[in-house]
Image (tube, rainbow, N blue to C red):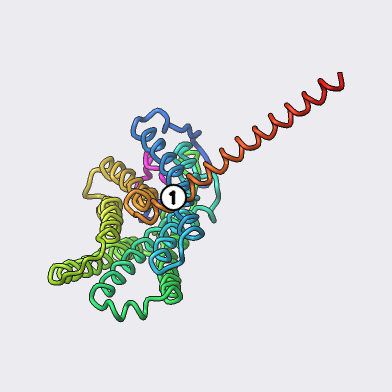
Amino acid sequence: MDYSDDYQYPEYNYSYEDNFTLPNKLVFQHKPKCLQEVLCVSLLVVSVIIFLLGFCGNALVIWISGFKMKKTVNTTWYLSLAISDFIFCAFLPFSITNMAMEEWFFGRFMCKFTSSVMFLNMFSSIFLLVIISVDRCISVMFPVWAQNQRTVKKATIVVVLAWFLAITLSIPSLIFRDVGSHLGRTICFNNYTLNQHSHKIVALSRFLAGFIVPFIIIIICYSVIILKLRTSRMTKSSKPFKVMSALVAAFFVCWLPYHVFVLLEMNYRNYDHSILIIGLKIGTFMAAANSFFNPVLYVFMGNDFKQKFKSSVLSKMENAMGEEGRTTSRYLSRSSSMDGRASTHI
């Protein structure tokens, strides 16, 4: 397959499957063109916004759910989600730099590691959403049993198992990501040349394990919950279900375009090259946007998070401003007394 001169996002540029050898000598002098293209500049700006909002937003959620709220099963779920998104956002500057310069400067290890982090985020997020859906379903179907069996310790064990599975499914990035030289630049790409079926196996396994199967489980859980709530007189607040529904919808909308274009890429000879490039770019950035949507949903849709946010952040600001005012008052009173003493000495 020919190299893509346009698509330079480090996580999902074209997968090279044909038998070829990357040139060892740099014949061409590469000049970045990203800042001259409207789409590239737009995605670059969006990436910076995603990094800033995602990094700060998830850090805030980690602080509130981890240190300001009582440790419960629900806060354990959401804290783990926030940690997953925070780790992903922390590595976004590598991708942003690569996109702006259209070259990979960080070596083979970081090429493999940054890609693994993004897939770790994808798998851990969807697995946690599945766990939360199953937990909600069990709580509605078997409230007495759930009241006695749902403990923070058990929730922590389940989260650890989910992370372990997510790490396992992220290993292909460590295997197939590679760096090479092309047209005077160093690129980070998917090298599937060792096995002709490896690309399809990896793409289909990610699609099934990271999208289709989890969503089937989530849909089943929510169907059961809706039927149960309709046939009973449960009067519990629907707020947690609205938050969960928003999280699931955001994940679906953000990740579906990426999976669609990755599947189309497997038969890249049957589709227009430029459409695949643009689709993969947009799909990748929509997937990245999911990492800052989650904290926004926590803050604006969760009553507990809003209350803790207001009580924690606003009280800190009030105390800081109050302390500054008290310090200023003490300084002025001391200055006045010193001036008074000085006038008596004179």
Question: What residue occupies the far front of the structure in this picture?
Answer: 344
SS label for mark 1: helix
Percent position of residue 16, x then y: 37, 53
Residue extent of the magenta highlight: 1-9
> Can you tell which quarter of the image residue 129 is in?
bottom left
- Residue ID at (32%, 77%): 146
Q: Is residue 319 left or right of residue 154?
A: right
Quarter of the image for residue 230 reads bottom left
Question: Which residue is farthest right?
Answer: 345
Instruction: Establish if 79 lies above or below 336.
Output: below
Q: Nearer the viewer, residue 34 or 213?
A: 213
Give the camera-side residue of 329 and 92: 329
Q: Position of residue 2 (x, y in %)?
A: 35, 46
Specify whether 110 is left or right of 305: right
Looking at the image, can residue 267 be seen?
no
Q: Quick one: quadrant of the C terminus? A: top right
**Residue on which disc 1 sits:** 309
Q: Amino acid at mark 1?
A: Phe
User: Number of labelled discs?
Assistant: 1
Which residue is at the front of the view, 11 or 289?
289
User: Is 65 rendered above or below residue 94?
Assistant: below
Residue 160 x %, y %: 45, 71
Residue extending farthest top: 346
Q: Position of residue 319 (x, y in %)?
A: 56, 43
What secondary structure predominates along the stretch shown in magenta?
loop
Residue 167 appears in which quarter of the rendering? bottom left
Residue at the spot 36% in from the left edge and 65% down from the top edge? 128
Side of 342 relative to 203 (left or right): right
Q: Is residue 4 magenta?
A: yes
